[in-house]
Amino acid sequence: MSTPSVASVDPAQQRRSFLLVVCCTIIGAAAQVLIKKGAGALGPNPTMVQTALAMLLTPSLFAGYSMYGVSTVLLVLALRHGQLSLLYPVFAMTYVWVTILSVLVFHESMNGFKLAGIAIIVGGIAVLGRGQSA
Amino acid sequence: MNNTPFSSIAWVLGASFFGSFGALFLKIGAGKLQKSLVSVVTNWRLLLGVGFYLFSSVLFVLGVRKGELSVLYPMVSLGSVWTLFWSKLVLGEPFTRAKFVALGMILCGIALLGLGTR
């Protein structure tokens, strides 16, 4: 495949960006778990105002949404260097962390499908990781 | 799949589509970032990127009111397919075999996680 002149990226910088996106996914997954934990504080059919208040007043919801904010800032910093098409798919690691955290925190069951899914996702991201220096 | 109405699938696919524009504009905005708070706050590309993300999450919430999460949640990851195309068309990043292989693996893996969550 031909490679047109993309702004050449320093491989070390591209790797740093890659690791930064992995950090984002860890924070994002923790945020999701906190939000799920806090969602119980909301009734079955919360209004917009109730939801907004709960986001501010329920500690786990507040922490969860704040972490989403932090993860967005980190993502922007990561995206300064490196190709979007190499960095963005790394976001799938969020699914891996959420699956693992759900087993640990919510005692969801682990099974063959989940294990295979985790392995293939990590494999795919490893392929991208190798492509980082290309 | 039978318990997941088409409307839910459409909402979630819409969410993945608009979310990919969020990624694109964050990337373009990040490239123009400077070391001053004013330049961050007035960086309309970043703001537009965040706006697309928020819009996308509203669509997602509308989508998951009905239907199976194990079907709908993995569909969000299709956003990275759209992003691959915007990266090529708008940013001029090359298509490489590694990118397609990796994306294919990641999507398969996420689909398997969906199956495991049933």
Image: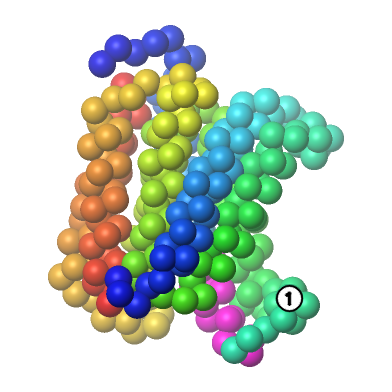
Question: In this orientation, does residue B30 appear?
Answer: no
**Residue B44: x, y in percent?**
75, 35
What is the total number of numbered labels drawn onto the structure image? 1
Q: Is residue B56 above or below residue B7?
A: above
Q: Is residue A37 magenta?
A: yes
Of the residues shown, which amino acid type is indicated by label 1? Answer: Met
**Residue A7: x, y in percent?**
49, 14
Q: Which chain carries label 1?
A: A
Q: Does the magenta stretch include residue A90?
A: no
Q: Is the magenta stretch mostly helix, strand or loop?
A: helix
Residue at 57% x, 61% y is B59
Query: Residue beneath label 1, please?
Result: A48
Q: Is residue A41 above or below residue B26?
A: below
Residue B58 lies in quadrant: bottom right
Q: Which quarter of the rendering shows the N terminus of chain A? A: top left
Q: Which quarter of the rendering shows the C terminus of chain A? A: top left
Q: Nearer the viewer, residue A131 or B21?
A: B21
Q: Which span is picked out in magenta?
A: A30-43
Q: Nearer the viewer, residue B23 or A102?
A: B23
Q: What secondary structure is found at the residue carrying circle 1?
A: helix
Residue at 45% x, 38% y is B83
Q: Nearer the viewer, residue B52 or A57?
A: B52
